[in-house]
Image (cartoon, rainbow, N blue to C red):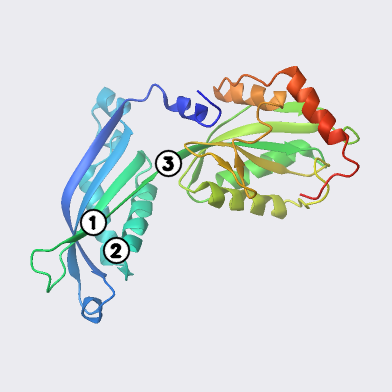
Amino acid sequence: MGPDDIISSLRIGARMGRVLAERIPLHCICGVREKERHGRTVLFADIAVDYDIIQCLADDKIENAVDYSALASTAMAFTERTQFYLLEKLADSLVSHLLASFPRALSLGLRLQKNPAGWGNTSFSCSLSGRRSLAILGLGSNLGDRGRALEEATERLAAIRHCRLLRSSSLHRTAPLLRTDQPEFFNEALLIETLLSPMELLAEMQSIERAMGRLRGERYGPRPIDIDLLLFEGFVSSSAALTVPHPGLRLRRFWIEELADLGLILPPASGAILRQRCEQIRKCKNFTKE
């Protein structure tokens, strides 16, 4: 298992079940034609929800399951109070609403079918899906009250809409790895569950950094707070905007130890690779701007 998918191992032990609700009538205003904007039409929805059924099998209680009747009622209520031009936009908004309304749902698939007037027996449909993803964030601080900075960052991250803090690692005190002429760091890692995309989550992280006084200066220099996206379930990227898994994940022992605190075992890079990387950076005459 590689660093890109190792985070999914945290779901091992779950027993996945599926609730399927079909042909749910949704009365809504949806369409681009003028006649579609002046009255409600009926769409039909098929909704499939995957979730961990272990607890509901153990106690036979509806509160530990995904209530399919409540699922249908929630979908119907949502479409009655919203209007959309595009079927795709309605589907996307409904998927997001249902996932937010049913926190036990790990993933949700939706198919909307439309039978517009004037098309006889012809129908049109749109299918979309969404899921909750696990992500691991690395936090660090080496300016000011470092312990309080990590606490505040954790509180702010836990308050992000559609994010849920699952657990955190122990606090690690670490010497600066690449720039040694600065105070030691306090570090920890957080495991979260989120409905946000990786780029949406990154934007929230950077907003928190700015709010806490992070200024983009010399790379690897001191900072009141640093928040890195280390792993994101089912996502791999090497773009200039975001690289996941984090390129330094196997090079920093404290991250490997923090992941172990969260239940993930990630073999470190060899000592030779780590020394080579540090030497490459130290040979640079100037550190580039972040």
Assign a secondary structure to mark 3: loop
Residue 288: mark in rendering? none
Disc 3 packing (10 Å; few <14; some 14–19; many ≥20): many
Q: Please provide percent x and percent y for residue 196.
A: 49, 48
For the point 31% across and 57% down, the residue is: 91
- Looking at this view, name the residue that lies furthest to the left: 120
On the image, numbered disc 3 is attached to which residue? 132
Q: Is residue 10 or residue 288 the one in the foreground?
A: 288
Disc 2 packing (10 Å; few <14; some 14–19; many ≥20): many
Q: Please provide percent x and percent y for residue 165.
A: 53, 38
Q: Amino acid at mark 1?
A: Leu
Question: How far apart, in angstroms, are the residues tagged by discs 3 and 2?
Answer: 23 Å
Residue 87: mark in rendering? 2
Q: Please provide percent x and percent y for residue 51.
A: 32, 35
Q: Does the residue at mark 1 contact the one at mark 2 (Cβ under 8 Å)? A: yes
Q: Amino acid at mark 2?
A: Leu
For the point 32% across and 71% down, the residue is: 85
Residue 112: mark in rendering? 1
Q: Is residue 130 left or right of residue 191?
A: left
Assign a secondary structure to mark 2: helix
